[in-house]
C-alpha cells in the first residue's frame, strides 16, 4: 500500500528530514507503508555532502540558512511556491536501480507539467525537468538499505525563483530557473499542482 500525504504548513528543512527518517524507519521495521510526502519548506539552501561547495558562491552572504544533507547533488533552494516531494519507497521490492528511480520521478513531473499545457522534458546528462534550457525541477535522492528518501523539488509559483539568483543552481553555470506558472502563463497554486503530481506519482509507483 502506498500513502501520499499532503502537508499543509511549510516545514523547516530539518523537520522535513526528521519526518522522512521516521517513515524510513517504519518501512524498515515493517510498521509502516511506503509513503510519499508532498510539502513546501521554509526558505533554505541545501547542498549534498561534497568537497566542492562552490555552487553556494559565498555562503556568508546568502539570505537564508544553508543545510548540508545526504542527498546527491550541488546547491539548491527550497521555499514557498515550490512543491517538494519525498518518496519513501522500498527499492528492494521495486528495483535496486537508482537511475531508473530518478527517471520515474522525472517522468511523473513531465506528465504533470503536460497536464498544465507545459511541454517539459529531459536534457542529456542533466538530471531534472526542463523546458528548453530553463529548469523547472531538481531531483536528488538518497537510500538507506535500499529505502529511498529525498526526491524532487518543482518550482510552481514565481515566488520560488528570486532566491536562486544568489547561488549556482545544481552547480550548473548559466542555468535559468523557471516555474510552472510562468511556463503555463497562468496562476497555479502549489496545492493545485500537488494534486496533479500525486496522480502522476500514483500511476508510476502505485
Image (cartoon, rainbow, N blue to C red):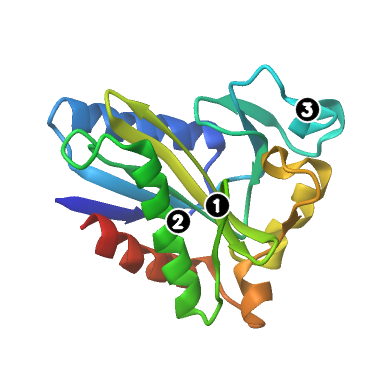
What element does badge 3 sit on?
A: helix
Q: Residue beneath label 1, please?
A: 128
Does 55 sit left or right of 61 as displayed?
Answer: left
Q: Depth check: 154 or 17 in front? A: 154
Left or right of 15, for residue 90: left
Quarter assignment of residue 13: top right
Quadrant position of residue 203: bottom left
Q: Which label belongs to residue 98?
A: none
4 left or right of 176 in image: left
Which residue was labeled with disc 3?
Answer: 54
Q: Residues within 10 Å of mark 3 (few under 14, many from 20)?
A: some
What residue is shown at x 47% (from left), y 52% (from top)? 39
Q: Earlier in the sequence, mark 1 or mark 3?
A: 3
State the SS at label 2.
helix
In the picture, the quarter occupied by the C terminus is bottom left
Q: Where's residue 117, x and y in %? A: 53, 82
Cα distance between the residues tagged 2 and 3:
26 Å
Q: Which residue is mark 2?
A: 106
Say if residue 7 shows up in the picture: no
Amino acid at each position: 500500500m502506498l500513502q501520499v500525504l499532503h502537508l499543509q504548513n511549510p516545514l523547516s528543512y530539518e523537520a522535513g528530514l526528521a519526518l522522512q527518517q521516521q517513515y524510513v524507519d517504519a518501512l524498515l521495521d515493517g510498521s509502516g507503508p511506503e509513503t510519499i510526502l508532498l510539502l513546501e519548506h521554509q526558505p533554505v539552501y541545501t547542498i549534498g555532502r561534497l568537497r566542492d561547495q562552490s555552487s553556494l558562491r559565498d555562503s556568508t552572504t546568502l539570505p537564508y540558512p544553508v543545510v548540508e544533507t545526504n542527498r546527491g547533488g550541488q546547491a539548491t533552494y527550497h521555499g514557498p511556491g515550490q512543491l517538494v516531494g519525498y518518496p519513501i519507497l522500498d527499492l528492494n521490492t521495486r528495483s535496486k536501480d537508482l537511475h531508473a528511480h530518478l527517471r520515474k520521478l522525472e517522468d511523473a513531473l513531465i506528465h504533470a507539467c503536460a497536464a498544465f499545457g507545459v511541454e517539459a522534458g529531459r536534457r542529456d546528462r542533466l538530471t531534472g525537468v526542463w523546458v528548453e534550457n530553463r529548469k523547472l525541477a531538481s531531483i536528488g535522492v538518497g537510500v538507506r538499505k535500499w529505502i529511498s528518501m529525498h526526491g524532487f523539488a518543482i518550482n510552481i509559483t514565481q515566488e520560488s525563483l528570486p532566491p536562486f539568483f544568489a547561488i549556482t543552481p545544481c552547480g550548473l553555470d548559466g542555468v535559468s530557473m523557471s516555474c510552472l506558472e510562468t511556463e503555463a502563463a497562468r496562476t497555479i497554486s502549489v496545492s493545485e499542482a500537488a494534486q496533479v503530481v500525486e496522480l502522476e506519482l500514483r500511476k508510476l509507483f502505485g
